[in-house]
Amino acid sequence: MTGWGRTTPSRARNRPCDDTGEVAGALGRAGPRGALARGLGRSYGDAALNGGGDVLALEAGLTGVRLDPDTGVVTAGGGASLDTVLRRIVPAGWFVPVSPGTRYVTVGGWVAADVHGKNHHRDGSVGNHLLGLELVTPDGAVHDLGPDRDPAAFWATVGGMGLTGVITLVRFQAVPIGSSRLAVDTRRADDLDGIMALMAATDHEAHYSVAWIDLVATGSQLGRSVLTTGDFAPADALAAAHRRDPWAYDPTTALAAPPWAPSQLLNRLTIRAFNELWFRKAPRDRRGELQTIPTFFHPLDGVTGWNRLYGNRGFLQYQFVVPFGAEAVLRSIVERLAGSAVAPSFLAVLKRFGAANAAPLSFPMPGWTLTLDIPAVGGGVLAALLDELDELVVGAGGRLYLAKDSRMAPALLERTYPRLGEWRAVRDRLDPGRVLCSDLDRRLDLTGRRTP
């Protein structure tokens, strides 16, 4: 098995689980390398790997989705994909409160990573919208958790990377939408200062906001970007042909990546050409374009297996957040990335985060978050560059996203997640035998297994 970046393979026993009883049984039979629930494998590094141990696959049976059409309360199995959820709720006039960049994640993974989306500056991350969840722990107990039911265990599970138990059921509040299309504004910014000023000025305009940023351009074009903001459009804004069924939703996959690609396909030269084209084709200022949900939220889902484009060496996804007031650090990081020959990226996005929630391991904090994909071909030079960037992030009071990480140094964990000790205490209460384990845990000593 590997993460989505295909850089950290490990072997494990796959244990399909059709119901809560099978989950409890599989946890009880776990060997010395422990067990871990795995969804659809969209975490980029080693968060959903458990080398030498057991991996519990829930998508075989725990996939049901129920919607209360009057209240928008959704009850979904931990193995249900967001794709399944959206196909059920969008035609009824509802949408998930937080959407990642892909709909191919399980609901359990959505919660375990406390996923954030393009609307964090307005609506927070997944944990903010949960009404409750069902958690199976290695002793076979089934816990009904919520913000008001064992809140310490609930918030430790939100963003807890699957290490507090197996999430088998989730209840959350969906949001009403006037149609299945979004009214999207697109604006270009010529440099980093321009995009940061534009994003700060438009925070209040729309629920959804994200900027694609050119991390190859240098000089006066450093940080040039394309900002897209949007909200769901009302039915009366649609073309006449679409008003008859304003919530129509039928996402399709148009293309498939080749089964193999040379590792050199995405290099500085090809990425520079792509970025130039992408920036130039974007309108300088276009308002109110109607886009579908897949186009706006999940564009890469239109290409099956797009991660294969990086070749057999795979790629790293690097995501950090630095607090507001650390704009100079963000600029320094952008300068270093743009000037590096080993870290070209055409998938780079900049967003603004709002307030953090109560989860000890939740990633977002008020500030700027930058996400980029980097071909894993730079060897020690790339590793040294990212280590330097880590220190800039940590020095500014920021941190890295555990669901994306595949190479952070263990020493940085406690420096960047100051409530780690609090989370470990709750985790040990739920799993005193330390059955739950992952390769991410072993690499970072997330659960404190090596602590005396």
Image (cartoon, grey):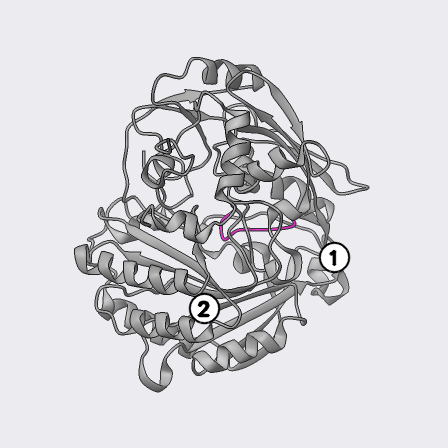
Query: What residue sits 42% from the left and 13% below the top?
Result: 29
Query: What residue sits 62% from the left and 59% below the top?
Result: 355
Q: Is residue 168 above or below residue 8?
A: above
Looking at the rendered structure, the kind of residue marked 1 is: Gly
Magenta residues span 96-102
Res. 414 in view = yes
Among the two numbered marks 2 and 1 on one chain, the one whose residue lies closer to the N terminus: 1
Q: Is residue 288 above or below residue 11?
A: below
Query: What residue sits 47% from the left and 18% below the top?
Result: 27
Q: Which residue is mark 2?
A: 212
Q: Is residue 281 magenta?
A: no
Q: Is residue 344 above or below residue 200?
A: above
For label 1, count other residues whose C-alpha is less than 10 Å away and answer few (under 14), some (14-19) or many (20+).
some
Tell me the element at label 2: strand
Instruction: Residue 208 in the image: state x and y as whole percent.
Output: 61, 63
User: Looking at this rendering, what residue extends furthest in the front direction?
Assistant: 452
